[in-house]
Image (cartoon, rainbow, N blue to C red):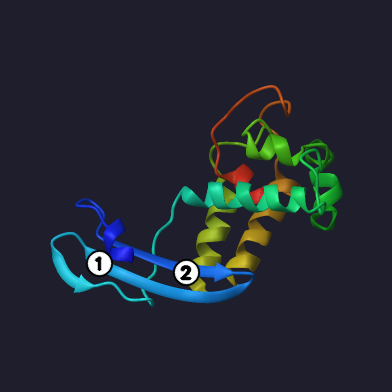
Amino acid sequence: MLESHLAEEVPSLSAVAIVEGEIRGVGAVGVRKLGDETKVTMDDKYDVGSCTKSFTATLAGALVEDGFIAWDSTIGDVLRDLEPKKAWRAVTLRQLLTMTAGVSAVAPEKIADQADDDYCKGKFTPREQRERAVRSLLQDTKPEHDPGTYYEYTNLGYMIAG
């Protein structure tokens, strides 16, 4: 079934079918790299890059729909345990996801270096690494612009929202 979805410029495809919370099927087809006949397996990992933004927004929407949070939930309400600076506390989920929260487009050097060090040395799980980076961002920086007033493309806002 998956083979029919491969295109000339798409080397491989992996999928899982979940029905009512149960895995009903898994599969992987194609090759690891165009021009190389090495078959892809279910153990291969994919670099999903910016697709994580749509994953994060979809999950946020599901949490809003289920009443766990609201689009106007604030960092101060949801992430108070991270002790954000006052300047971040009123920033909303909506602003984070629409890139109008005032979050910098580039991670401050200290935070980027810490994240690289944590990752390279394997000191923390990926979840712990993200929490450390978000905590540093919310405690050691302030919004670059007044939240809600300026659009700036940023991955960091989605990291906070996640």
The amino acid pointed to by label 2 is Val
Give the structural element (helix, strand or loop) at label 1: strand
Residue that badge 1 annotates: 30
Can you say whether 144 is above or below 107 in the image? above
- Give the residue drawn at x 73%, y 41%: 93
Can you say whether 41 is above or below 57 in the image? below
Give the structural element (helix, strand or loop) at label 2: strand
Q: Is residue 89 left or right of residue 35?
A: right
The amino acid pointed to by label 1 is Gly
Q: Circle 1: is it few (<14), some (14-19), or many (20+) Cα within 10 Å?
A: many
Residue that badge 2 annotates: 16
Q: Circle 2: is it few (<14), some (14-19), or many (20+) Cα within 10 Å?
A: few
Outermost residue on the top side: it is 149
Task: Tell me which corner region of the image, top left, top right, bottom left or bottom right, holds residue 42.
Answer: bottom left
Q: How many marks?
A: 2
- Give the residue drawn at x 59%, y 45%: 156
- Residue 46 position within the rendered picture, expressed as x and y whole percent measured from the top left: 39, 63
